[in-house]
């Protein structure tokens, strides 16, 4: 770098720092300002940001500029995501290079590598128990391989998302090892107690995450005479975010990954990052201060990068992760729309969309600032039936009974159920039962194929395409879970792997079946139909500008119990999206669609005109329409 370019580069950094200074330091002052080490901490943080900026490659700085000019890059309808475990998809990182053509053919422009940083040996909670944030899982390759893949993805316009576990590290992480040896500095990185007095007090209001196989939220280590906060599994030690050193370390990690070519950082389990006695220790106000500050740090030193926040909480608690009040437009760029996912399954089982319409209309704003949802039907985790008693009551349901019905239905034990799934973490105290299963199996394909029921197979295909059409149009980046596009069934053999046997989530994390893909690509069988359908949906999404994430999503009452609808409104035009959640024929008055902004009876999804009978739009079983 010549002197002038270097000066110019430093001036750009100064400009970025000034633009986000208040966002960063106002938050930090409130978190750590009372501490004697606050000033030195601020100086160290500024130096760390500057060092990361200096290390950032010209290519990535160019991307920073590009995204400064196109801040809506992640909200555009051409963004569509695909989520996979690298080993289950392609063997290892190098193998991903051979699969890029497939991703492109699918219409994917965003990939999420499930945890790929160095995990602890043995059971690592699917990689969420990380022992080194600066190294890649050796089973997948090296950091150099990672950078090669990131560059290859970028050259094809595919953005890369990776997990950054903020709430805890593996107990084998270097910090934890030092803490275990008694180094006070590192003991303060975690939440350690000399006896169980405080843990017992905290536990009175904590909610169990893994009640089955990791009960309680604390673990006693007699060898060091400490109790350690372990919200998830015993081997996952919660970090102490009240210690500014933890913030500093994690900013370092975050920018290290950003400089390796990551576009989206998925912050895992963020709700749990701040603890307060007498609460559930989830979504405390300080969590939002922390996330606002982390966002500002990225904006300063790696502005092309955005944040996806994983907060699987109730609807009202979730929206703040996308920036509410003082954090408006300044917190997460993306957050999982857990409610949309839950309501999809609820409406599908009950053939009744009233709860769905009520929940989505009453808890979610029609538009978000500088943010959008990650929409999905399935992911690597279980489905928890996040339906509140109040919402259920509002539509005449009993919350507890409805949740129990959904578990039974998707486990496949409710009479007449089409689904085949498995229970995950039964909590006898609350009666909560969560569910595992692939999209295809929960949607009825596994059962229908086993029974050779041709009509039911058709319905299952329709349900799978209904779900994909929903997440592609609602607003946000649709995330397809690997294998759903070829309707992969449950992997009942997961129990053969000893480190997985206790965790039924492996049921819906099958390995990719490339033979099935080959057949599906040439249009063969059920998989071929689903694949063609998913590709078509993504292509039509691209061609429908109204589906941009910054446009309004207004939930519409149809007056029909089996239909769900919303309007995507752009300044000049609208698309009215209607979904039939039943296996029966249904209809809607043509006037209804016109009143909601449709100007022609043209379905832009199927690219065909919609039939009207006696002035009513006719909807076949499981129909999905995007009316222009
Ligand atoms: C997140 C992950 C989940 C994991 C947990 C603990 O919820 O999605 O798979 O078990 O965090 O890291």
Image (cartoon, rainbow, N blue to C red):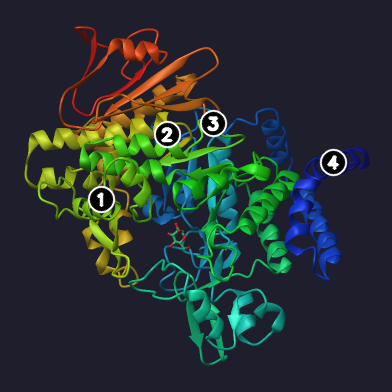
Q: Position of residue 405 (x, y in %)?
A: 21, 52
Q: Nearer the viewer, mark 2 or mark 4?
A: 2
Q: Name the residue under label 1.
A: 402
| Distance between mark 3 and mark 2 Cα atoms | 12 Å
Q: Name the residue under label 3.
A: 367
Q: Nearer the viewer, mark 3 or mark 1?
A: 1
Task: Tell me which numbered mark, 2 or 1, is placed earlier along the sequence.
Answer: 2
Q: Is residue 100 visible?
A: no
Q: Nearer the viewer, residue 441 or 628?
A: 628
Give the number of the disc on residue 361: 2
Task: Tell me which numbered mark, 2 or 4, is placed earlier along the sequence.
Answer: 4
Quarter holding residue 134: bottom right
Residue depicted at x 44% and y 50%: 314
Label 1, secondary structure: give it.
helix
Pointer 3 with pointer 1, Cβ within 8 A: no
For the residue carrying disc 3, how many other residues have a C-alpha within 10 Å: few (<14), some (14-19), or many (20+)? some
Task: Tell me which numbered mark, 4 or 1, is placed earlier along the sequence.
Answer: 4
Q: Where is residue 343 in the image (x, y as percent from the top left)?
A: 33, 42
Task: Tell me which numbered mark, 3 or 2, is placed earlier along the sequence.
Answer: 2
Q: Nearer the viewer, mark 4 or mark 1?
A: 1
């Amino acid at each position: 770098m010549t002197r002038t370019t270097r000066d110019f580069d430093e001036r750009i950094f100064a400009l970025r720092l000034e633009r986000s200074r208040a966002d960063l330091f106002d938050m930090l002052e409130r978190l750590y300002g009372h501490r004697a080490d606050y000033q030195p901490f601020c100086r160290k943080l500024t130096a760390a940001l500057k060092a990361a900026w200096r290390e950032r490659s010209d290519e990535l700085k160019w991307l920073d500029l590009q995204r400064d000019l196109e801040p809506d890059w992640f909200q555009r309808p051409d963004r569509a995501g695909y989520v996979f475990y690298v080993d289950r998809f392609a063997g290892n990182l190098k193998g991903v290079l051979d699969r890029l053509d497939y991703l492109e053919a699918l219409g994917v422009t965003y990939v999420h590598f499930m945890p790929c940083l160095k995990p602890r040996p043995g059971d690592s909670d699917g990689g969420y128990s990380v022992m080194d944030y600066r190294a890649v899982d050796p089973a997948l390759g090296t950091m150099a391989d990672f950078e090669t893949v990131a560059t290859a993805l970028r050259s094809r316009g595919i953005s890369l998302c990776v997990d950054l576990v903020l709430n805890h590290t593996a107990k084998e992480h270097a910090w934890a090892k030092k803490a275990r040896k008694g180094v006070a500095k590192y003991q303060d990185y975690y939440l350690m107690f000399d006896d169980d007095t405080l843990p017992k007090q905290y536990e009175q209001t904590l909610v169990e995450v893994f009640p089955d196989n990791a009960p309680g939220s604390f673990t006693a280590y007699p060898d060091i005479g400490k109790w350690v906060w372990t919200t998830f599994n015993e081997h996952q030690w919660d970090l102490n975010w009240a210690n500014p050193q933890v913030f500093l370390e994690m900013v370092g990690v975050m920018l290290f990954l950003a400089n390796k070519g990551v576009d989206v950082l998925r912050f895992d389990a963020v709700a749990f990052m701040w603890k307060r006695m007498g609460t559930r220790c989830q979504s405390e106000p300080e969590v939002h201060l922390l996330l606002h500050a982390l966002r500002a740090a990225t904006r300063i030193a790696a502005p092309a990068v955005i944040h996806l926040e994983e907060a699987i909480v109730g609807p009202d608690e979730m929206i703040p992760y996308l920036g509410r009040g003082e954090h408006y437009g300044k917190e997460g760029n993306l957050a999982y729309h857990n409610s949309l996912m839950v309501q999809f399954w609820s409406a599908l089982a009950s053939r009744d969309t009233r709860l769905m319409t009520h929940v989505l209309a009453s808890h979610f704003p029609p538009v978000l600032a500088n943010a959008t949802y990650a929409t999905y039907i399935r992911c690597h985790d279980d489905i928890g039936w996040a339906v509140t008693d109040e919402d259920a009551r509002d539509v005449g349901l009993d919350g507890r009974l409805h949740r129990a019905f959904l578990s039974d239905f998707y486990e496949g034990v409710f009479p007449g159920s089409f689904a085949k799934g498995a229970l995950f973490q039964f909590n006898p105290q609350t009666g909560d039962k969560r569910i595992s299963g692939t999209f295809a199996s929960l949607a009825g394909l596994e059962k229908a194929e086993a029974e050779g029921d041709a009509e039911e197979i058709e319905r299952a295909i329709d349900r799978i395409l209904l779900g994909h059409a929903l997440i592609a149009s609602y607003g946000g980046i649709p995330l397809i879970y690997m294998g759903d596009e070829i309707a992969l069934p449950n992997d009942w053999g997961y129990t053969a792997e000893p480190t997985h046997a206790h965790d039924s989530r492996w049921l819906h994390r099958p390995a990719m079946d490339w033979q099935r893909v080959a057949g599906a690509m040439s249009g063969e069988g059920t998989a071929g139909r689903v694949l063609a359908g998913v590709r078509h949906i993504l292509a039509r999404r691209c061609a429908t500008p109204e589906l941009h994430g910054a446009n309004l999503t207004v939930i519409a009452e149809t007056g029909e119990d089996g239909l769900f609808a919303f309007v995507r409104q752009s300044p000049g035009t609208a698309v009215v999206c209607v979904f039939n959640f039943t296996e029966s024929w249904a209809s809607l008055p043509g006037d209804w669609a016109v009143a909601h902004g449709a100007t022609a009876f043209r379905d832009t999804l199927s690219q065909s005109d919609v039939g009207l009978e006696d002035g009513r739009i006719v909807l076949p079983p499981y129909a999905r329409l995007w009316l222009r």
